[in-house]
């Protein structure tokens, strides 16, 4: 039901704002299963939902896959650009016209299966380990907010 409502909202909004000749660039990153490159085409759960919404609204949408920080920067500079698969944060609220959520999932920390010695039950225990993530990722902001460097 949520997807159907989203598609209707995009179709209704686009019908009043765009002509059939409008072309949008949808920026995103390699983030399976939500968006990823397969046989030269951006596909995935979120990419497919947005592509379907564009098709229903009769808007030509082209997907552009970049590293996350570049995708976000390009989307903000492009008046006919959008960004898919991003977390909605207070710091981003005024930067975008939000549609969605398309889909949501919990965040997790992962470890090698052989590492029986790692047991983390709270964020303070993370300080004993190195955490890897993409520069500019939402989790970088969260970890900094928690006091991590």
Image (cartoon, helix red, strand yellow):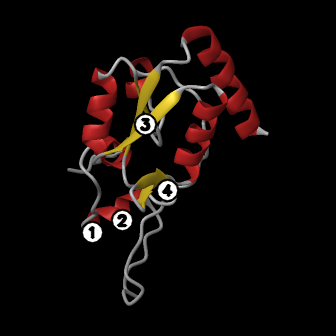
SS at circle 3: strand
Q: Name which of mark 1 and mark 4 comes first in the sequence.
A: 4
Image height of 133 relative to 63, above or below? below
Question: With 149 as the anchor, is 115 left or right in this view?
Answer: right
Image height of 57 relative to 51, above or below? above
- What residue appears at the point 47 percent right and 62 percent down from the top-left corner? 108
Per the rendering, the mark at residue 107 is 4
Q: Position of residue 21 (x, y in %)?
A: 49, 18
Question: With 102 as the anchor, is 22 left or right in this view?
Answer: left
Disc 1 to disc 4, C-alpha distance: 19 Å
Look at mark 1 in the image and give the residue it sits on: 128
Q: Name which of mark 1 and mark 3 comes first in the sequence.
A: 3
Q: Position of residue 118 (x, y in %)?
A: 38, 79
Q: Position of residue 102 (x, y in %)?
A: 61, 40
Cβ atoms at labels 1 and 2 below 8 Å apart:
yes
Q: Is residue 41 visible?
A: yes
Disc 3 to disc 2, C-alpha distance: 43 Å
Look at mark 2 in the image and give the residue it sits on: 125
- Kindly indicate the quadrant of the structure image that contains residue 18: top right
Q: Name which of mark 3 and mark 2 comes first in the sequence.
A: 3
Which class describes the residues within 10 Å of circle 3: few (<14), some (14-19), or many (20+)? some
Question: With 85 as the anchor, is 142 left or right in this view?
Answer: left
Disc 4 to disc 3, C-alpha distance: 28 Å
The N terminus, quarter of image:
top right
């Amino acid at each position: 039901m949520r997807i159907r409502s989203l598609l209707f909202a995009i179709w209704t909004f686009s019908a009043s704002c765009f002509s059939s000749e409008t072309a949008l660039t949808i920026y995103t990153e390699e983030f399976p299963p939500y968006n990823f490159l397969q046989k030269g085409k951006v596909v995935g759960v979120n990419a497919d939902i947005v592509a379907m919404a564009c098709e229903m609204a009769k808007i030509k949408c082209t997907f552009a896959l970049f590293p996350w920080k570049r995708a976000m920067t390009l989307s903000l500079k492009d008046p006919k650009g959008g960004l898919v698969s991003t977390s909605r944060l207070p710091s981003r609220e005024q930067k975008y016209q939000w549609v969605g959520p398309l889909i949501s999932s919990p965040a997790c920390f992962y470890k090698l299966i052989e590492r029986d010695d790692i047991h983390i039950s709270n964020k303070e225990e993370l300080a004993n380990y190195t955490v890897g993530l993409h520069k500019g990722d939402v989790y970088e902001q969260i970890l900094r907010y928690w006091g991590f460097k």
